[in-house]
Image (cartoon, rainbow, N blue to C red):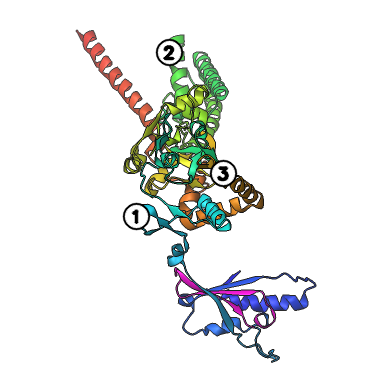
């Protein structure tokens, strides 16, 4: 596949390669794509196609549109009608138009069927299960009509063999079949026939994405607990060494004694050792003037050790700040149960297929937190609320029933890594339906041929937003940014909390010192 101004280059290079290379191939297929908008005014577009490859090779498709974002484009192929060209210099070849495609009117090709509820007007229906049933009716010469008079979606059934929605319309013989993501439901099976399974439908959720944890212990994260123990042990040794050396300090031999004062007390030495150790650990100098080489040597060694420790700590802290610790998110079935997160949908049909007495404790706890909201309320809550929003994971990975989630809310949501539960979808039919056996054989043949996967991908490409699908599927994986990271308040909030705590303690200590000083003066 070659685009725009690269077409003549590729044609020339490929022709030369086919002559001078030992490589052989008899199954070459080429697609050349260009738009009139990007063709320079000084360039004749026919010069794109004056290579020998366009005269000699049959498997060539040319796709041409007037604009880069055009919905109308033509599909052409090279023509072999007429005498063969034997000239020494190649010239432009003619192309025949195979099809003119308009993507804007593509939906007019959807199946149009008669709607009995709208006084004979036609409605558009499409989907994997719909296409399957339409082809079955075409093979068996059936006339397809729909009924849109019931607004209760899947509906419900009652013990007296009546019901609402699609289920009720089958029971009261208003329609001959009901389809469209209908799960196998035991209560419905007791009163109606079901077809062979049409597909697997997994029920999962878009849950709130993890947020950075505001933690006062952020300064402790660069080192592990064992390393912090080693650092504290090293500081204690420094303190004891400085205190002992200070207590035993003597003037250098070359100096003249100027004082006969006794050596400092152990209390003074310990105070000096602790203060000096903390200063060195913070890369600060001491105001004490040493008079012995022993104390100078201990200070120099301690300073070198503390420089190494603080450098390693600073590098670890920089890495921790750019990779903030995130809270645990309810992105699995078990964690959804542990977090007691509420989740919502537009209908109770998402949970009506279960018998409370037979489900496990985890699923029962999840089902108890299901809430029903309309589409408008779900759109609003998806931007702010800490709750899950139900979506359907189809058999081959696409996500359905997520249309009510707005695009700007997807950035704060994350797709669960597994399903809450899954069910098989079927077509519900009235008892003694004459075509049940033929329909079941047709469905099995459809699965074995692989059309179920092809149709799901085709329907998803025609009716689902590819960008939204990719964003929802990509949200399962953690977002790893290996480039520069802008630090925000969330990176420093732990340090700020610790700083506020220290400033509060310092202020209280200062007030206490003032009070004690005032009491001593009295």
Q: Position of residue 381 (x, y in %)?
A: 34, 39
Q: Is residue 301 above or below residue 60?
A: above
Q: Which of the two discs, 2 and 1, sits closer to the camera?
A: 1
When asked about the image quadrant of residue 352, the answer is top left
Residue 199, label in figure: 3
Name the one closer to the observer, 223 or 67. 67
Q: Position of residue 429 (x, y in %)?
A: 51, 42
| Label 1 sits on residue | 118
Residue sitting at 52 percent across and 39 percent down?
Answer: 431
When asked about the image quadrant of residue 172, the answer is top left
Residue sitting at 43 percent across and 33 percent down?
Answer: 161
Secondary structure of residue under mark 2? helix
Quadrant occupied by the N terminus: bottom right
Residue sitting at 69 percent across and 89 percent down?
Answer: 84
Q: CA distance from mark 3 to mark 2?
A: 82 Å
Residue 268, label in figure: 2
Determine if residue 275 is in view: yes
Neighbour tally class for label 2: few under 14, some 14-19, many 20 plus, Cα within 10 Å:
few
Is 30 part of what is drawn in magenta? no
Name the one closer to the observer, 115 or 89. 115
Determine if residue 261 is in view: no
Residue sitting at 72 percent across and 69 percent down?
Answer: 27
Region in magenta: 54-79
Q: Which of the two discs, 3 and 2, sits closer to the camera?
A: 3
Secondary structure of residue under mark 3? strand
Sequence-first tag of 1 and 3: 1
Q: Is residue 135 above or below residue 356?
A: below
Sequence-first tag of 3 and 2: 3
Sequence-first tag of 2 and 1: 1
């Amino acid at each position: 596949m070659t685009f725009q101004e690269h077409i003549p280059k590729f044609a020339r290079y490929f022709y030369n390669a086919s002559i001078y290379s030992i490589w052989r191939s008899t199954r070459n297929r080429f697609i050349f794509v260009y738009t009139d908008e990007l063709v320079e005014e000084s360039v004749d577009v026919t010069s794109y196609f004056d290579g020998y490859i366009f005269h000699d090779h049959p498997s060539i498709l040319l796709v041409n549109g007037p604009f880069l974002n055009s919905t109308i484009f033509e599909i052409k192929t090279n023509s072999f009608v007429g005498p063969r060209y034997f000239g020494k210099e190649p010239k432009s070849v003619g192309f025949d138009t195979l099809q003119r495609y308009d993507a804007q009117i593509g939906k007019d090709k959807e199946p149009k069927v008669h709607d009995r509820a709208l006084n004979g007007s036609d409605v558009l229906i499409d989907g994997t299960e719909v296409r399957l049933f339409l082809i079955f009716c075409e093979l068996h010469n059936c006339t397809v009509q729909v009924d849109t008079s019931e607004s209760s979606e899947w509906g419900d059934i009652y013990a007296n063999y009546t019901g609402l929605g699609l289920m009720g319309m089958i029971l009261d013989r208003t329609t001959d079949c009901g389809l469209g993501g209908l799960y196998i439901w035991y209560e419905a099976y007791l009163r109606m026939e079901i077809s062979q399974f049409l597909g697997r439908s997994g029920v999962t959720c878009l849950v709130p994405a993890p947020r950075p944890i505001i933690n006062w212990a952020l300064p402790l994260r660069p080192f592990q607990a064992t390393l912090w123990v080693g650092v504290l042990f090293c500081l204690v040794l420094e303190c004891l060494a400085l205190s002992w050396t200070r207590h035993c300090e003597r003037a250098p031999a070359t100096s003249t004694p100027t004082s006969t004062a006794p050596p400092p007390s152990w209390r003074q030495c310990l105070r000096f050792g602790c203060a000096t150790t903390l200063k060195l650990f913070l890369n600060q100098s001491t105001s004490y003037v040493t008079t012995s080489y022993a104390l100078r040597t201990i200070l120099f060694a301690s300073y070198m050790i503390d420089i190494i420790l603080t450098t390693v700590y600073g590098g670890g802290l920089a890495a921790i700040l750019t990779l903030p610790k995130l809270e645990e998110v309810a992105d699995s079935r078990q964690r959804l149960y542990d977090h007691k997160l509420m989740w919502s949908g537009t209908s109770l049909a998402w949970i009506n297929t279960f018998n409370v007495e037979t489900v496990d404790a985890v699923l029962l706890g999840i089902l108890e937190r299901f809430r029903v909201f309309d589409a408008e309320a779900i759109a609003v809550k998806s931007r702010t609320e800490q709750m899950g929003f139900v979506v359907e994971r189809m058999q081959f990975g696409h996500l359905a029933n997520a249309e009510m989630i707005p695009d700007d809310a997807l950035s704060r949501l994350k797709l669960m890594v597994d399903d809450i539960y899954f069910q098989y979808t079927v077509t519900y039919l009235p008892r003694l339906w004459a075509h049940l056996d033929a329909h079941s054989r047709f469905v099995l043949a459809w699965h074995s041929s692989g059309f179920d996967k092809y149709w799901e991908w085709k329907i998803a490409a025609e009716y689902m937003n590819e960008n939204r699908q990719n964003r929802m599927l990509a949200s399962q994986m953690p977002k790893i940014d290996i480039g520069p990271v802008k630090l925000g308040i969330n990176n420093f909030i732990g340090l700020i909390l610790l700083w506020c705590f220290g400033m509060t303690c310092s202020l209280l200590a200062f007030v206490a010192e003032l009070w004690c000083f005032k009491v001593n003066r009295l």
